[in-house]
Image: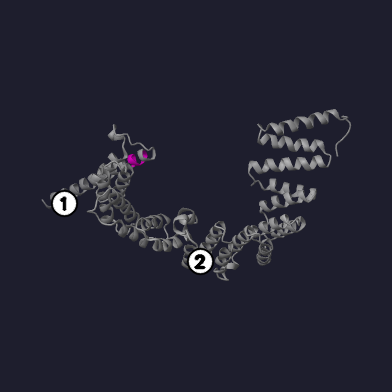
Amino acid sequence: MKRLIIDGLIILAVLGFAARNIQLFLADLHYQKGEKLLDRKSFDRSKPLEQPLFHYERASAILPERAQYQRAMGRTCLKLYHSGSGNLRHLYMAYHAFQQVLKLDAVYPYGWSEMGMVLQALKEAGVSDRPSPEHYFTRAVEIDPTNPLFLIRLIKWRLKQSQPDQARKLLSRLLISYPKALKLFGKKLLQSEQDLIKFADHLGNHPDANLQYAYYLLRRNYPDMAEAQMERISESDRLRPDIVLRMAKIKVAMDKHEEARQMLAQAFEAAPHESGIARYLARILAKEKDLNGAIEVLKRALTASPGQWELNLSIARLAQKAGQDELALENYTQVLDSKQANASIEKEIYTERADIRLKQGNLRQALVECEKALKITPGDAKLANKVKRLRVELEYRNPGTEDH
């Protein structure tokens, strides 16, 4: 008898386990179907089985304890809601779905932020018996303080509530993680010169935020304020190659080329392996018509950090401009030998090598280079005509004459 009871309990446990697995399988099947339909943007209301919401509802009904399914249902309902339609059914469905999400996972920030979106839509639709969205937007930011999406939503809410000072403080935080923040909110939050000054004070000495703001001030035609903004960056951060490079670019934009060159030269002396610094310093020197100086900088950078084909390419281009044809050919060859350049760069190299060979009077080698370039882009009519002209000219010459 005791054995029968034990066997019965084992069978019940096995059946329970199997039933649970079937539930998990069916719920996930509906969820995955909903995801596929959502990717295809399938919202045909005449075909319920072809709507993502139908499958998310089924998944949630089978396993209501899965926050993932509840969130999918809430987000889809939010997509289906059309403001101004007067039909709030989908908004209320989204509201109840996100209530479940927050009960199941109270530390999941997206649930809080998306509930804020639902409550904001309800408020804008004239519903007054629901909580304020502010608490939900704020809670999402508290959980994940650097997430751009949460900060953007909270800033937009602050703007709707006519709270520009609080929005500006949030914007300074957003600028650290989202460089396009000023483009998104600058016109609304930084209208007057006083607004610009207030915002500067919120940034502290954070290098990235201050540099982004310096760019913005320069575009707004406040060069003195942009200069002052860069001064807020700490001395230690100014030693960072990436910061030096960005500061130099701002200096160039201010037409302070000499200051930019000195800044880069000092950084290059300390770190000749930093190819970004070397290339930008060489660019400034080249604009100052010091091609040899630019080439020497790039050569030194290549010695400090061998194998960087981009440096070989820069040297080749400058050498060709400077009339140093053999140096240009040598470095163009090294770029090709690296096997890292894309087809566009390879075509450029073959074309430039052809021009050098023509300059040297070697028509046959120039033709070879042009044919290699044409193989990369067979539809290039201009290059095809050049190949034809070279062939005709070679045929016209005395066959016994060897090109040099």
Q: Looking at the image, is 260 positioned above or below residue 366?
A: below
Image: magenta residue range: 32-36
Measured as percent of width and height from the top left, residue 290 is found at: 76, 57
Q: Is residue 18 visible?
A: no
Front-most of 211 and 355?
211
Q: CA distance from mark 2 to mark 1?
A: 68 Å
Q: Position of residue 371 (x, y in %)?
A: 72, 34
Q: Which picture quadrant has residue 287?
A: bottom right
Give the answer, above or below, for where 173 lies relative to 325.
Answer: below
Indicate whether residue 340 is drawn in magenta.
Answer: no
The residue at 17%/49% (across/down) is 7
Frontmost of labels 2 and 1 is 2
Q: Which mark is residue 6?
A: 1
Can residue 116 be seen from the camera position used here? yes
Q: Is residue 76 left or right of residue 403?
A: left
Q: Position of residue 160 (x, y in %)?
A: 36, 55
Kindly identify which numbered label has been placed on residue 206.
2
Residue 340 location, x and y as percent? 64, 47
From the viewer's perspective, is 74 left or right of 380?
left
User: Element type at marker 2?
Assistant: loop
Asked whether 45 or 104 is in front, the reply is 45
Q: Main secondary structure of the magenta part?
A: helix
Quadrant hosting residue 57: top left
Picture quadrant where residue 161 is located: bottom left
Disc 2 crowd rating (10 Å Cα; few below 14, some 14-19, many 20+) is some
The residue that appears at 46% across and 53% down in the rendered structure is 184
Residue ID at (13%, 50%) = 5
Amino acid at circle 2 = His
Q: Amino acid at mark 1?
A: Ile
How dense is the environment of label 1, judged by Cα within 10 Å: few (below 14), some, or many (20 and up)? few
Q: Which residue is found at the position 69% from the left and 55% from the top?
A: 283
